[in-house]
Amino acid sequence: MTAPAMNWTETWNLAVEALRANKVRTALTMLGVVIGSGCIVLVVTVGLSGRTFVRRQIEAVGSNIVFANLGQPSASRNVALGDQISLGDLDAVRRDVPQVVRVAGTNDFPMSVVAAGKSWPVSLVGVTQGFQEIRNLVIVSGRYLDDGDFAPAGKVCVLSEHLAQIALLGQNPIGQSIHVGELTFTVIGVFRERVETFGQSEIRTDSLLVPLPLVRYYTGDTFVVTLYAQAATPEDVGPVTDGVAQVLRSRHGPSAEYNVENLSSILETSRRISLALTIVLMLVALLALLISGVGIMNIMLVSVTERTHEIGIRKAIGARRKEILYQFLCEAILISGAGALIGIGIAVVIPIATETLVRFLPVPGGVAIPISWVSVVFAFVVSCAIGVFFGYLPARTAAQLQPVESLRYE
């Protein structure tokens, strides 16, 4: 004779009623799952947010840029003028490296500005056309250097924001004259870096950008210190790096050594650090889930002991072992599943609320907080799996109770 099919609706209803009968115990048991599942989602969210933030900062410094300069010579060898990077090298990179969309060069050296009776050290930076686009410089007021300013007689400059404040004492800098050493420039604009490089590039806190032909006219230098090349896409950064290095090697002597680098290494390093931290914190979150699973098992074993008489009555009126087993497994799944949903809900609301609040703060470019829906599904599935795993022992214990002995239990 075929056994009657299980009534799943009744099984779930019995499980819900059993949990509702002990609301406080259920809530406390569920708390560990809430914390563990929420931590999984938050950990992945923080890792993704950190990676996105670093990528945006690098793109703000200069998107897809490759930079090259002459390496430091050894003590036994002097730098030959022919080893310096020339404007012809810039043209060769533009011509021979197909993935390059923009090329620029700079030559910077220290100078001093006399203002308000004080001498301020500044960095005078001669730049070629295209430098602003490559470095993503923000023009605060006035304008940047245009094509007409690159004539040798164009004595104009663009000041950094801090230099404009200290050298011109809060005046409107546009149209003002500024004395740098023995040179006098007319200020046509004020700029700032989109993201501070803290002096790690040619741009310092106090800097003047002037046309490179003007620097050549006064100093006689026909070379650039740093060559910049901008790739069309992030995928082209590697080929452009190799291409720039090959062009420089082919146009200069074998003894010349050039440092050709890009910002991808920084991005890769940040990615590895983010991944390592995510894995460590994920293990902590999984440990919290495992501890909550042990808590579920302990509480359910206590529940089985307390409900021994009830189990005996159910078996006496025809309940099968399988039905008792599934009822307690359903209770474990409800505890872990509901806890996971609550924890995931909290973990999703926190980034959304944080991103909304950050919009009102002066954060350059804002902060994007992506939510990984894969981590949401993972947290829910793992939480339910832990509920089933740790709930099986109490469920099996309940299913194996003998009806007569259970009825005698007080």
Image (tube, rainbow, N blue to C red):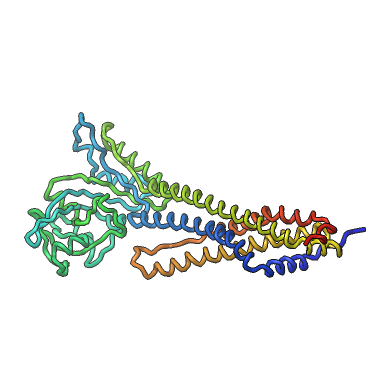
- In the depicted view, which residue is nearer to us: 115 or 248? 115
Q: Name the residue: 23% across, 34% down.
A: 73
Residue 248 percent coordinates (x, y):
30, 39
Please tell me which residue is depicted at 11% across the width and 56% down the height of the picture: 113
**Residue in front for this viewpoint, 321 or 41:** 321
Decide which of 212, 324 is in the foreground and name it.
Answer: 324
Percent x, y of residue 198: 27, 53
Residue 359, position as x, y percentages in the image: 39, 69
At x 43%, y 62%, the residue is 368
Q: Position of residue 107 (x, y in %)?
A: 21, 48
Q: From what the image shows, is residue 206 above or below residue 250?
A: below
For image coordinates 70% across by 62% down, the residue present is 331
For residue 65, side relative to residue 333 (left or right): left
Q: Residue 149 is drawn in which quadrant?
A: bottom left
Say which of 38 and 74 sits in front: 38
* Residue 165 sits above or below residue 68 on the image: below
Q: Is residue 95 left or right of residue 225?
A: right
Q: Is residue 329 left or right of residue 217?
A: right
